[in-house]
Amino acid sequence: MLDIDFLWVGEKAKTGDAITAQFTDPATGRDVVVVIDGGFSDDGDRIADHVRRYYGTRRVDLMICTHPDDDHIKGLFGAIENLDVDTLIINRPAGFGHVRDDVKSPLTEDLVATAQVNGTRVASGFTGDTYFGGALRILGPTELYYTELLGEQVKYAGFAASIGRTLSKAASAVMTALQGVSHDPGETLVTDNGGTTPRNNTSIIVKLAVEGYDALFTGDAGVPALNRALDHLESVGEHRELDFFQLPHHGSRHNLDPATLDRVLGPQNGGIPRGTTFVSVGREADDFPRSEVANAAKRRGYPFMATRGIDLRWNRGGAERIGYRPAEASGWLAE
């Protein structure tokens, strides 16, 4: 049994990730619960309610904070306080001598303290760590790459504000509401458009392999982080065709390029379904995921489903949910 839920995050255009999963641990035969990221502060109680209602338990065996941006970490406070969390996986800048807010160290340590007060064990998460008899594998980052990215974050912080203003202006010039078209408009994703931030590339990348199904969770990781993760997956002989893929960073055009998509999903196949892509976007974030990114995934056989104010469920087995509306994959988007 494998049950994956993307809870909606963001009433307006703001968005974040809050993901839960329940599956049968192949090592013990017991059903276990994993939470990956928690959205904003208001989302913590919803995560707890979801786990209790649909998984029939208060216990979370493993909670993962992919990286300490507000839209991923803040909801985990409420989730920890309202559930019985066995282990929290979070990488701590303070453990590498970085204690400033440039790297979100104070917020990270606040979550660690909350976890410890509530009896939750705290662990780091680096390439090669496995749980549940190897069913859950952390693909990245390596500890060395993480420390390099911490240094880059400190340098980046000095000019991030001016870059943010520039990117905001550039984004506003290209943002248009997504519109469907009846045919493939052709590949326009050429590069990762300058890449994403160092902190996004610290995202813990997770693969879940249960009962023959493979799911990849990417946080906000960009091209260099994803390719390092794929290198590890290939080195251990576990790079198989995915059934489920999380489009990184809400479908941003700064996190993927064609070569990386080919490695993750396989080459273009005209949109013949191979699997499913989920993406978390705000209820009114009509310009995300980026059309060129969503189409590129669909072109490789992975049509996307976006939260936009509804919870999404992908399941193979799991209890029937009365009144739970199934999501529908989106078609081609105008570019």
Image (spheres, rainbow, N blue to C red):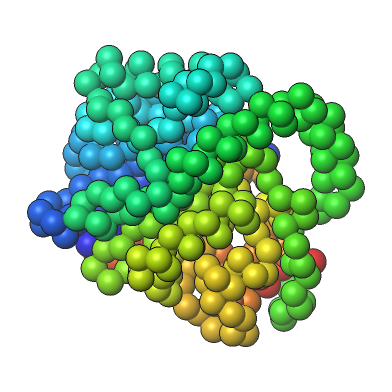
Of 1 and 142, nearer the camera is 142
> Could you tell me which residue is drawn at 60 percent across and 68 percent down?
261
Judged left or right of residue 184, residue 123 is left
| 118 relative to 250, above or below | above
Tally of marks: 0
Would you place residue 254 above or below residue 169 in this image? Answer: below
Relative to 142, residue 2 above or below: below
119, 38: nearer the viewer: 119
Residue at (43%, 60%) from the top-left corner? Answer: 232
Where residue 327 sits: x, y (%)? Answer: 47, 61
- The answer to whether residue 162 is above or below residue 142 is above
Q: Position of residue 7 (x, y in %)?
A: 45, 44
Quadrant the N terminus occupies? bottom left
Q: Is residue 89 visible?
A: yes
Answer with left or right where residue 276 lies relative to residue 153.
left
Task: Return the residue nearer the eye: 237 or 311.
Answer: 237
Q: Is 153 displayed left or right of 162 in the figure?
A: left
Where, by quadrant of the figure, is residue 207 drawn? bottom left
Q: Position of residue 180 (x, y in %)?
A: 72, 68
- Residue sitting nearer the eye, 133 or 179: 133
* Res. 71 visible in picture: no
The quadrant of the picture occupied by the C terminus is: bottom right
Q: Is residue 231 left or right of residue 314?
A: right
User: Residue at left 48%, top 30%?
Assistant: 73
Tell me which residue sits at (71%, 29%) in the image.
155
